[in-house]
């Protein structure tokens, strides 16, 4: 391709081309190159672009290119736009000299791994309008005053590096008029003075160290053009008054600060994203909160009290509503479920909501995540929930629901997470013990701490295709999330509490590779079905504190990805299957308080657990337990040495036998004289037990 001398325009963007970047050193008329969105690999060299004096546009973004960015790219005399984002470049020369004749107006190096200081010659590119360096590893300090040398700059993105930005001098009237400024994670200690910025539309100062009040003037920057304001993850305590939130603002993110008091005034009708979560707001939620065209609303992790305002049902564009972790009370408004057909996420977790769950889910229910856990809800699971045919996450745990298993859920094939723990559910699981049941993406199933009984459903385990490696259709590199604007990168990520390795932990992201079954603290009886061994992609299995009987099935040894296995507090008997020793990822094992017997199998993985894993099984013996098993057969070479030891033990025993019997006779006479017979018998049994157990230990000791 590089030998096509008349070639002037190349656009191979968004294909699946792989390999190295082609060479264009003979195509002297080439003006436009776009290979973005492919799978190109390897470094770039000087020869790739040598002699391209007419080139105006180069876009190699979203590939896998690596190494050093060739300095020659910055000396191409006609180049105006250089776009290298979303690659793996790690170096750019820091000591070049920018050509005074450079035409470069757009430089995008974002989302690479570039280290070192930002090259000074970037600030000598006087025609530069767009400088995007975010999400790299640039370090050192940068002076905001350097931007005076870029009079045409309109877009500056420095977020998510290792930079420290000194914002002194930003108030100067000669400072360039910027429309987009992002400085997230730039170690800012205070607000840059942007009062003279009359064109600013997009401002991101999140994840810094800014303290105190939000200045009143920040709402006036851009002369009313401000549409995106992100001040999240700082240490802000209040909003300086007087303030007026601009009408054109469509995104306001103040989450993870220390803002307190009543909720600020609601933004205008343009707002679509509003996040006040993780602050210290209190009082009631404004009664008119639903009278805006909001799409995303999060007030979670505050101290709001009172009822959920009925006006929220008027928010006809609402996709995500998160009011979790507050002190909201009263019943759940039936209109909230019945009138907002667009709602994809409803999270009311950890409040004080009472009453029944309204049976008002509409026929066009769009819910993907419903979290009503940790409230005081009663009654039954509504039958109309089956209308939510796209439901992926359902969490009703830790309420006061009294019902049988919600069998209507078996018709929702999209379900991935079902958490019903700590309620009053009861009865059998017959409806899910069906060979035709398929939950292809099921990951988390938690019905712990209820009153379910009967046998464990053997066919149910075979229906969990998401936990069977050979059939697992999910992408292990992704997690459960809800994309609430199709043309954006905005996602809502569900959080759930699970019990793993005897600890309750919160999953802030539910990776699709993580699989979990918890049937603990119920009344299940009979055997553990052997079909459970089909779940070879299962990470956590908890069947503890039931009334399960029979042997531990050998097929549990087929759970090759299991990390946490808890079968404690049952009535399991028989020996521990040696197949458990092959579970190489197992890091937590609890078989305590059963009726297991025999030797603890020796295995690479089982040797890593201490006696706590096996306590409460009197019939078990061998390491790591203190009670030893009977000695195995020994070779002739060891026999003579062992016989000598045993003979020595017999010699210790025989001279003392006569004295022991005489003393025992005296002891019995005194005992029966002063105590009732059964008490005497118990004490005699204890004495003899101690004596013979000590003798047994001595005889089995390899030497003294």
Image (cartoon, rainbow, N blue to C red):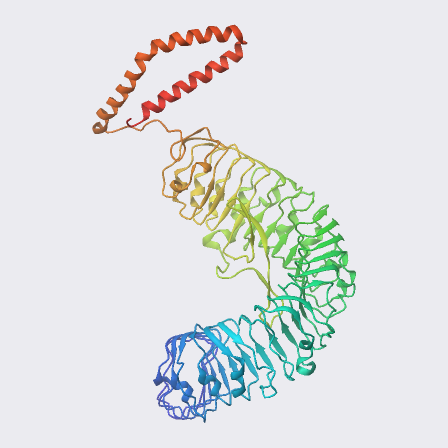
In percent of the image, x 22 and y 24: which residue is there?
Answer: 640
Foreground pick, 468 / 232: 232
Foreground pick, 28 / 76: 76
Does 267 sit above or below residue 57?
above
Can residue 528 be seen at all in this image of the molecule?
Answer: yes
Percent coordinates x, y for residue 428 in the rendering:
62, 39
Q: Quadrant of the N terminus?
A: bottom left
Percent coordinates x, y for residue 654 in the rendering:
30, 13
Foreground pick, 191 / 541: 191
Can residue 295 be seen at all in this image of the molecule?
Answer: no
Does 172 sit above or below residue 548?
below
In percent of the image, x 23 and y 26: which residue is there?
Answer: 641
202 relative position to 592: left or right: right
Give the quadrant of residue 139: bottom left
In percent of the image, x 53 and y 12: which residue is there?
Answer: 678
Percent coordinates x, y for residue 148 in the rendering:
54, 86
Does 311 sit above or below residue 174?
above
In percent of the image, x 33 and y 12: which residue is there?
Answer: 656
Q: Quadrant of the C terminus?
A: top left
255 relative position to 620: left or right: right
Percent coordinates x, y for residue 350 in the rendering:
67, 52
Does 683 sit above or below residue 409?
above
């Amino acid at each position: 391709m590089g030998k096509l001398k008349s070639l002037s325009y190349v656009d191979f963007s968004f294909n699946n081309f792989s390999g190295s970047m082609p060479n264009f050193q003979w195509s002297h008329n080439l003006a436009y190159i776009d290979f973005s969105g492919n799978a190109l690999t390897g470094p770039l060299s000087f020869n790739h672009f040598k002699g391209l004096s007419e080139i105006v546009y180069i876009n190699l973004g979203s590939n896998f290119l690596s190494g050093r960015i060739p300095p020659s790219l910055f000396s191409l005399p006609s180049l105006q736009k250089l776009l290298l984002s979303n690659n793996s470049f790690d170096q750019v020369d820091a000591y070049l000299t920018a050509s005074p004749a450079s035409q470069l107006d757009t430089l995008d190096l974002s989302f690479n791994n570039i280290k070192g200081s930002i090259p000074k010659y970037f600030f000598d590119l006087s025609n530069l309008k767009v400088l995007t360096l975010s999400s790299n590893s640039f370090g050192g300090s940068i002076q905001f005053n350097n931007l005076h040398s870029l009079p045409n700059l309109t877009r500056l993105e420095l977020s998510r590096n290792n930079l420290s930005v000194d914002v002194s001098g930003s108030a100067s009237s000669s400072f360039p008029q910027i429309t987009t400024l992002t400085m997230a994670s730039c170690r800012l200690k205070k607000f840059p003075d942007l009062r003279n910025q009359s064109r600013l539309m997009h401002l991101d100062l999140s994840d810094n160290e800014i303290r105190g009040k939000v200045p009143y003037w920040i709402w006036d920057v851009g002369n009313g053009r401000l549409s995106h304001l992100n001040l999240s993850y700082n240490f802000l305590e209040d909003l300086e008054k007087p303030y007026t939130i601009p009408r054109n603002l469509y995104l306001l993110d103040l989450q993870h600060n220390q803002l307190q008091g009543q909720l600020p005034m609601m933004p205008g009708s343009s707002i679509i994203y509003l996040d006040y979560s993780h602050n210290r707001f209190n009082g009631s939620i404004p009664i008119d909160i639903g009278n805006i065209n909001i799409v995303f609303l999060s007030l979670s992790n505050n101290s709001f009290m009172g009822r959920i305002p009925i006006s929220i049902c008027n928010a006809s564009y609402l996709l995500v509503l998160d009011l979790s972790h507050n002190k909201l009370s009263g019943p759940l408004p039936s209109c909230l479920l019945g009138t907002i057909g667009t709602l994809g996420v409803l999270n009311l977790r950890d409040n004080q909501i009472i009453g029944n769950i309204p049976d008002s889910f509409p026929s066009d229910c769009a819910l993907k995540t419903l979290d009503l856990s940790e409230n005081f809800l009663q009654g039954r699971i509504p039958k109309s929930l089956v209308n939510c045919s796209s439901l992926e996450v359902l969490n009703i745990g830790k309420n006061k629901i009294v019902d049988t298993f919600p069998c209507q859920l078996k018709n929702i094939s999209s379900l991935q997470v079902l958490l019903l723990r700590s309620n009053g559910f009861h009865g059998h699981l017959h409806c899910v013990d069906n060979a035709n049941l398929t939950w292809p993406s099921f990951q988390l199933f938690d019905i712990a701490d209820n009153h379910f009984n009967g046998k464990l459903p053997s066919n149910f385990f075979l229906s969990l295709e998401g936990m069977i490696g050979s059939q697992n259709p999910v992408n292990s590199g992704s997690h459960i999330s809800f994309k609430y604007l199709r043309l954006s990168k905005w996602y809502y990520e569900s959080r759930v509490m699970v019990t793993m390795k005897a600890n309750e932990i919160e999953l802030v992201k539910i990776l699709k590779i993580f699989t979990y079954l918890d049937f603990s603290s119920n009344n299940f009886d009979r055997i553990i079905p052997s079909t459970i061994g089909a779940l070879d992609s299962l990470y956590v299995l908890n069947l503890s504190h039931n009334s399960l009987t029979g042997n531990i099935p050998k097929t549990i040894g087929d759970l090759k990805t299991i990390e946490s296995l808890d079968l404690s507090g049952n009535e399991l008997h028989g020996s521990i299957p040696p197949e458990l020793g092959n579970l190489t990822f197992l890091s937590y094992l609890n078989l305590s308080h059963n009726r297991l017997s025999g030797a603890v199998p020796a295995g690479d993985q089982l040797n890593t657990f201490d006696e706590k894993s096996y306590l409460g099984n009197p019939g078990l013996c061998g390491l790591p337990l203190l009670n030893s098993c009977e000695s195995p057969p020994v070779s002739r070479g060891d026999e003579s040495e062992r016989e000598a030891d045993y003979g020595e033990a017999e010699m210790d025993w025989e001279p003392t036998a006569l004295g022991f019997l005489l003393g025992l006779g005296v002891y019995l006479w005194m005992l029966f004289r002063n105590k009732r017979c059964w008490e005497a018998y118990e004490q005699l049994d204890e004495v003899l037990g101690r004596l013979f157990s000590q003798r047994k230990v001595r005889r089995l000791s390899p030497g003294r």
